[in-house]
Amino acid sequence: MASGRIELSSQDKGKILAYMENFNPSQIAKKMGRDPTTIRRFIGKYKKTGKTENLPRSGRPPVLNNDEKSALVNEVTQNCHKPLHEVINTPDLNCSITTAKRTLYDAGIHSHIAAKKPFVSEKQASARISWCEK
């Protein structure tokens, strides 16, 4: 869940460092239109580490990198009649169906039809064909 804080840009960080020589954190905050606590936190971190870059964040790394996500999207759009579980079982893509669905959804491809059993009715057949032609 996001904390609601807006990250300082590198330009803002540079301004704070420039203002730090002549102004206190409250004055810098007024000049920049920021909360004084944000300025104090940045100055404290800068004095402690000597760096302006953000520290790496915790959390699990993504299962698929950007290249693998692109490969998945390309494979699904080229082979739209192939079930999703067969697409992800290739050596290049090793992920769960849930991860694949989420990646496709984020790319604007709603693949709920591709992961289901083969169609039985004419209505389902036309829906599947129209999905592939988009």
Image: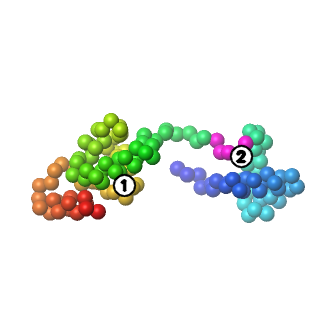
Res 29 quadrant in image: bottom right
Q: Is residue 95 above or below residue 111?
A: above
Amino acid at dot 2: Thr
- The picture quadrant where one finds residue 134 is bottom left
Rendered residue at 73%/48% (across/down):
42
Give the Cα distance between marks 2 and 1.
Answer: 35 Å
Instruction: Characterize the local packing of mark 2: few (<14), some (14-19) or many (20 or more) Cα atoms within 10 angstroms.
Output: some
**What residue does disc 1 label?**
105
Residue 52 x/y as whole percent: 71, 46
On screen, residue 26 versus residue 63, left or right, reads right
Q: How many numbered dots are placed on residues in this image?
A: 2
Q: Quadrant of residue 57?
A: top right
Residue 12 magenta:
no
Amino acid type of the residue tagged 1 in the rendering: Tyr
Residue shown at 31% from the left, 48% from the top: 75
Q: Nearer the viewer, residue 118 or 27?
A: 118
Mainly helix, strand or loop, the magenta region? Answer: loop
Name the element at disc 2: loop
Could you say whether the residue bearing mark 1 is in a helix, strand or loop? Answer: helix
Question: Which residue occupies 74% across, 39% down?
Answer: 49
Q: Position of residue 114 (x, y in %)?
A: 24, 51
72, 42: nearer the viewer: 72
Residues in magenta?
Answer: 51-55
Within 10 angstroms of label 1, few (less than 14), some, or many (20 or more) residues?
some
**Residue 1 in view, yes or no:** yes
Q: Is residue 66 above or below residue 19?
A: above
Q: Taking 121 as reference, is 80 left or right?
A: right
**Upstream in the sequence, badge 2 or badge 1?**
2
- CB contact under 8 Å: marks 2 and 1: no
For mark 2, what is the residue? 52
Asked if residue 101 can be seen in this view, the reply is no
Residue at horizontal 88%, vertical 55%? 22
